[in-house]
Image (spheres, rainbow, N blue to C red):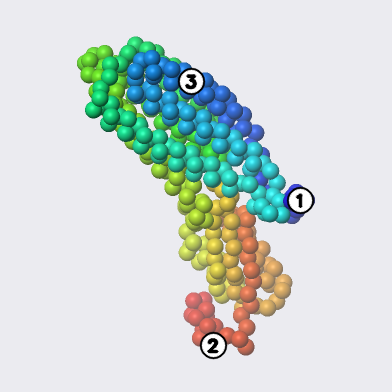
């Protein structure tokens, strides 16, 4: 049976779990509102024969799935690490964001295909019902976007960020549908509906790509955006007795938790010096770069086992 490590947190730099009550309440409320309006918009799209409404209802369905995944991620991320999952379950929120982004890309391509088919085989649209549902959708999406935006300000979460992208796209869609209805009424050109759908698919594709890219970079353990590896290593090398920094790794566990590990070569074998220098380096990384979870391994320069040229290169750098 898996053990948890809750007793070790007192000594730990970073707790590998998140308790996000604000995000949880926001997602539950958003999920209920979105599920209801998805049903309304789907029925309205069928009755009015509007591809824009139908395509947006499927996008809203993707929002429901996205919110559901985000809810699972929030509940999992609150669980404590075990002897098998020593980082806890924080990475699942990144996986959920990746799936949400992938869903956006797939749906945008489907909408594009349907729009092209509607251009080839046009249908009459009931613009009155389309307008009513679009106005309701606009109000719903304004409320949901506002809720998610304020939740993101209070608690950083890549899933809230991806959900916000979904609903920001929905808000633009609703504005676009209303504009399309007005133009159809004024001009009688039914082709405006599939053209609008193509614009909607482009917006969704852009948002899906950005979410996929952010989640992919975290899953690939790339250096977090805004942090310069060379600059960090240079700052570490400026510390007293530090000759070199190598085996340097910097990555994200999730959207707001970064980890760093490195080997630090010292020219002093004094244990008190080593302890003091490591504390200085950890303080530097914490205050200047916001890196709270660091693992630094000390290596002492031993001339009996190293070539003289190896030592001289450090002396040249220090000069």
- In this view of the protein, can residue 207 be seen by the observer? no
Q: Secondary structure at mark 2?
A: helix
The one of 152 and 221 positioned closer to us in this rendering = 221
Q: Which residue is mark 2?
A: 308
The label nearer to you, 3 versus 2, is: 3
Circle 3 residues within 10 Å: few <14, some 14–19, many ≥20: some
Name the residue: 52% across, 62% down: 232
Taking the view exactly as shown, the residue that stands out farthest to the front is 121
Q: Position of residue 113 (x, y in %)?
A: 32, 34
- In this view of the protein, can residue 61 be seen by the observer? yes
The label nearer to you, 2 versus 1, is: 1
Q: Which residue is mark 1?
A: 1
Q: Which residue is mark 3?
A: 39
Q: Is residue 195 left or right of residue 76?
A: left
Mark 3–mark 1 distance (CA, rounded to whole Å): 43 Å
Vertical placement of residue 87 versus 73, above or below: below
Q: Label 1 near label 2: C-beta < 8 Å?
A: no
- Give the mark, 3 or 1, whose residue is nearer the N terminus: 1
Q: Position of residue 176 (x, y in %)?
A: 34, 24
- Give the mark, 3 or 2, whose residue is nearer the N terminus: 3
Q: Quadrant of residue 115?
A: top left
- Give the mark, 2 or 1, whose residue is nearer the N terminus: 1
The one of 111 and 93 positioned closer to us in this rendering = 111
Numbered label tally = 3
Name the residue: 58% across, 66% down: 262
Mark number displayed over residue 10: none
Vertical placement of residue 56 versus 298, above or below: above
Q: Secondary structure at mark 1?
A: loop
Q: Quadrant of residue 21?
A: top right
Mark 2–mark 1 distance (CA, rounded to whole Å): 53 Å
The one of 193 and 119 positioned closer to us in this rendering = 119
């Amino acid at each position: 049976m898996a053990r948890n490590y809750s007793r070790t947190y007192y000594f730990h730099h970073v707790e590998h779990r998140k308790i996000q009550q604000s995000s949880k309440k926001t997602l539950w409320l958003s999920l209920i509102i979105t599920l209801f309006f998805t049903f309304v918009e789907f029925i309205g799209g069928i009755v009015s024969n509007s591809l824009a409404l139908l395509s947006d209802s499927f996008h809203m369905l993707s929002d429901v799935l996205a919110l559901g995944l985000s809810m699972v991620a929030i509940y999992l991320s609150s669980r404590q690490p075990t002897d098998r999952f020593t980082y806890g379950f924080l990475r699942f929120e990144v996986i959920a964001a990746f799936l949400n982004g992938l869903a956006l890309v797939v749906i945008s391509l489907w909408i594009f295909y349907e729009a092209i088919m509607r251009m080839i085989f046009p249908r009459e649209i009931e613009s009155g019902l389309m307008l009513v549902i679009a106005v309701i959708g606009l109000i719903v999406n304004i409320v949901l976007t506002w809720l998610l935006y304020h939740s993101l300000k209070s608690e950083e979460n890549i899933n809230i960020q991806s959900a916000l992208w979904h609903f920001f796209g929905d808000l633009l869609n609703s504005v676009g549908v209303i504009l399309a209805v007005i133009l159809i009424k004024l001009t009688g050109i039914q082709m405006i509906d599939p053209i609008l759908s193509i614009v909607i698919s482009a917006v969704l594709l852009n948002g899906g790509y950005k979410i996929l890219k952010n989640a992919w970079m975290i899953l690939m353990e790339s250096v977090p955006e805004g942090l310069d590896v060379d600059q960090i290593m240079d700052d570490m090398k400026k510390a007293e007795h530090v000759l070199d920094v190598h085996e340097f790794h910097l990555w994200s566990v999730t959207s707001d938790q970064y980890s760093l590990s490195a080997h630090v070569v010292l020219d002093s074998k004094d244990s008190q010096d080593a302890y003091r220098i490591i504390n200085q380096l950890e303080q530097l990384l914490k205050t200047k770069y916001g890196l709270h979870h660091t693992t630094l391994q000390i290596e002492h320069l031993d001339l009996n086992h190293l070539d003289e040229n190896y030592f001289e290169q450090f002396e040249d750098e220090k000069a």
